[in-house]
Every structure is written in structure tokens, then in C-alpha cells.
Amino acid sequence: MIAAAPLPGAAFGRPAALAALVLVFALFAMARPIDHDESQYVAAAVLSGEGLLPYRDYAYLQTPLQPLLFGSVAKLLGAYAYPGLRLINAVLGALAVMFVYRAARAAAVGVRPALIAAGLFAATDILLFGTGSARNDALPVALLAGALWLIIAGEGRRRTPLAAFCAGLLLAAAAATKASYALPAAAYGAWTLLDRAHRPLWVAVGAALPTALVLGLASLAPEAFRFGVFTFPADAPRQYFASGGKGYKLTLAFRLIDLAKFLALGAALPALLLVASRLRAWRGHARIDWLLHLLIGVGLISAVLPEPTWRQYLLPLLPPLFVRLARVWDDSQLQWQRFAFTAFALAGLAPTVIAFGSAAVEGIPMVRVLDEGRAIDRALDAAGAHGPVASTAPQLLPGAERLPDRRFAAGPFFLRSKALISEADERRFHLVSVGRLRPNDLPPVVLLGGEARWSGGDPGLDSEIERIAEPRIAKRLKVGDGRLRLLLLTPPLQAAARARLSSSSE
């Protein structure tokens, strides 16, 4: 039987430990390089802060909870929205670690193995990447870990309706933030039907609230919702990698190699092997162990299903895996096992430590973003330029207190696609692909340079936009040291007249 753990009063352990963890994660978040993956998440939060809704008013390529929750925060932070959203994710990452610790303690695990498991979880590159950037990874993993703690804390005693309601609410909210968390949520829902002590009705009532929110937004723009949440994630990667000569990354064999590689950047790989080795003694497992095995299994499935495999897809696996690791941890393990866990943990920390060292030498990326934002703001004010800005890197615009053009809010990912949908659907869904972009489609201001090698992007996309804008370019302005540049465009009619004049003079 699982020992009952105290509920909210002792949820986070010592406040000083949580504060220290938040500080470490926050420092890492400020030091991590800019990633073009962050583009749509920052843009979505900023646009939602202006009262716009995903799918209906702008394209969003995920389930919608995060921009709705973070929109008011982005509005409040203003020019500091981008680093602020990273800091929020750092706090959520620290909470996820603390929830794993509390879940392990609730599962009758001693302080030492619970701390070891939580520490190993914190040292995985998967978690550090997800919580060090302004993506949609930190919120759902914190929600999942919190739900896991509530579920385990109620094991072996009469579970309250409130605890069951909150568990369902958190799991469904995780799925409403990132679709890959729907599998763990559904798996636990099925488990409650087999074990009625989990109060399936109350779990379902809690899950109904985020589900209703998603369905309500989907009803406002059903086709745009279906494209953003289902069609684009399935079709766009296949098109991009196949056309770029990297179709091998979509094969199951290569995805399994990537899976092992990402698990090995941290203690997740040896933890998985150790937990799997204990499956042979299946008669000795408690019910909660079988639930953890179920969640680990569906976490692996949710990571393998998308094509190709990326490290953040493994996050749903980690909370149940490290709670289960705490349950099987034995301080009398062989010396080589302890050495292996230490070595893998150091490997998981290595990319973040390298990024931190680079920031110490080259400058903190988030400070540079703010400096460049102020430079953009000054340049546009001096030119008298106003209105939304077209950019493949809309995450850089809050620093200039400028809004992104809604058609560019999805970042570079739809822009680089080729005829995934009709031109009419692009207009209806507030999207534009570069192959269909015309000079007159662009607003008066274009920001270039953010889709580059330093942000993990392809500079050719910005070059193509500049080529398309050429007939309307009135002025080019460098920003800061020149890695970013602004294009000030003439009005469409004026550009057309200039082109006719040039043609007649020839």
C-alpha cells in the first residue's frame, strides 16, 4: 500500500530549495541561444494579449491553451515579453521537478532516492531545453507532473472528489497545451475505469473544462483548427525533409536512433533500462507501479509517433519514468550503475553548460534581444513607420514594441511550406507561404535576419522574402551590429507606379 502524502500544505517541500531551483533554471533560460522554434509561441502570446484568438484571428499550429494563459502576461510585460516568457517556463520547469519529488515521496520513497530521481530529471537535456526556451513544453510537463503527484498521493486511501477533479483538469490542460499529452491523459482516463477508486466521474468533470475550451475555439474556425492541430504537424515535416534530401530522418530506424540519442543526454536512458529490467518481477509490483508503467509506455509511443523525432517529444515520458526510478532505486547498487547515472547526467547538462559558457563570453542572448528591440524601435520611430511588421522571427518584435503581421505569426514553418493548402485557404487561415508571397502582400515594414544559422534557421528564407520585396524597397536599415536588418517599403500603388515609370523609360 502506498503511504498517503500530505496535500497542498507540503506540496513544494522547502521554499528555499524551490527558489534555488527556479534561479538556476532562470539563469539557464537567459543564457540559452535564440531558437526559431520559439517564434510562433511568442507571437501567439503577444497577439492573444491584444484580444485576438488562435485559429479565428491568427494561425496557431498547436492546441491553444498556452497563448490564452500567457497572453495577458505578455501584454503586461510589453517589451520584455520574450525573456519574460522564458522565465515563466523556467519557473514551470522547477515546479515540474518539485512535483516529481513530491510524487516520489507520496509513493513511499525515502528522501534520498526521491531527491536523486528529481535531480536526475532536472539534469536531462530534454527538460532543460523545454524549460529554457519560450516554447510550449514547460507548461504541459508541469501540469502532467502535478497531476501525477495528486494521483499517487491519493493511492491507498479514499481519494477526494477534489483531488480527482484536479487530476483530470491538469491532464486535460496539458493536452490542451500540447497535443502529444493527450495520450497520457487518455491512458489515465482508461485506468480510472478499471480502478474506480480513482473516481472516474470526477476526473472526467475536471477534464471537461479544458476540453470545452478547445472545442469552443475549434468551433469558431473549425477548418483552421483542424489544419493547425492535425494536418500541418502531420504533413509539413514530411514535405520539408523529403524535399530537402533528408527523408531518412522520417524512417522508423532513424527515429529510434534519435530517440536513443536524446534519452542518452541525461539519465533517462539508464533509468528506462533499469525500470525495464524490473518488469520481470511483475508479481511484486503494486498497482501504482503498473500505472507508472502504463504512463511510461504511452509516453514512449507519443515520442515515436511524430515524424521526425525531436527531444521535446520525450517530455511526457519523463515524470512517470523518474518517479518509477525512485521506486526501484537502491543505494546498494553496483558501483558501475551509480557511475553510469552520474555520467549520463553530466552528458545531459553539457549542452546547457556550453550555452551558459558561450553567453558568458559572447553576451547574454536575452539582453541582446532587448538591445536590438530598442534599436528597431528607434529606427522605425525615426522613419515614421507604424503598424504590424512582417518577419520570419516574430519573437524578436516585442522588444521593439511592435506587433507581428498576423500572416507571419506562425514563424518560418508555414512560410517555407509548398502548397500544403490552397491559396484561398491560406488567406482564410491568416497564413502565407513564400512561394505565393507577392510584393503587395507585404506590410510597410519587414524585419529580416532572424531566420539564420545562429537561431537554428535557414537564411535562404529571409533572402527569398527580400527578393520578393525588392520592387517596393524604399530603404534598408541595419540594426545593431547588422545581424538584423529592416526593409521600409513603399505603398503598393506607389511601387506599381514606380515600376511602370521604370519600364517606360527603358
Image (cartoon, rainbow, N blue to C red):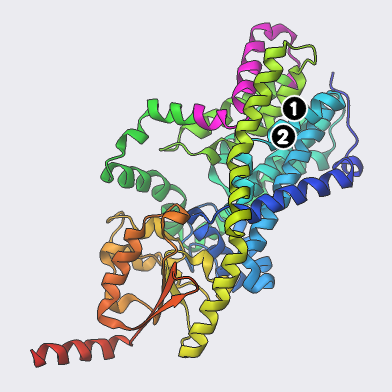
* 266 magenta-colored: yes
Q: Are marks 2 and 1 in contact (CB under 8 Å)?
A: yes
Image point (47%, 66%), residue name: 58
Mark 2: few, some, or many residues within 10 Å (few <14, many ≥20)?
Answer: many
Mark 1: few, some, or many residues within 10 Å (few <14, many ≥20)?
Answer: few
Give the secondary structure at mark 2.
helix
* 274 magenta-colored: yes
Residue 480 is tagged as: none
**Residue position marked by numbered label 1 in the rendering:** 196
Q: Quadrant of the N terminus?
A: top right
Which quadrant of the structure image shows residue 298?
A: top right
Which quadrant of the structure image shows residue 470?
A: bottom left
Image point (27%, 66%), residue name: 436
Residue 383 in the image, given as x and y percentages of width and height: 46, 89
Cα distance in 3D space between marks 2 and 1? 6 Å
Which quadrant of the structure image shows residue 249?
A: top left
Q: Compared to 26, does 488 lie above or below? A: below
Residue 441 in the image, given as x and y percentages of width and height: 32, 76
Secondary structure that dominates the magenta span: helix
Q: Which residues are magenta?
A: 260-288
Image point (26%, 87%), residue name: 495
Q: Compared to 13, does 375 lie above or below? A: below
Give the secondary structure at mark 1.
helix
Which of these two is toward me, 325 or 449?
449
* Residue 97 in sight: yes
Residue 200 is tagged as: 2
Q: Compared to 427, does 61 lie above or below? A: above
Q: Quadrant of the C terminus?
A: bottom left
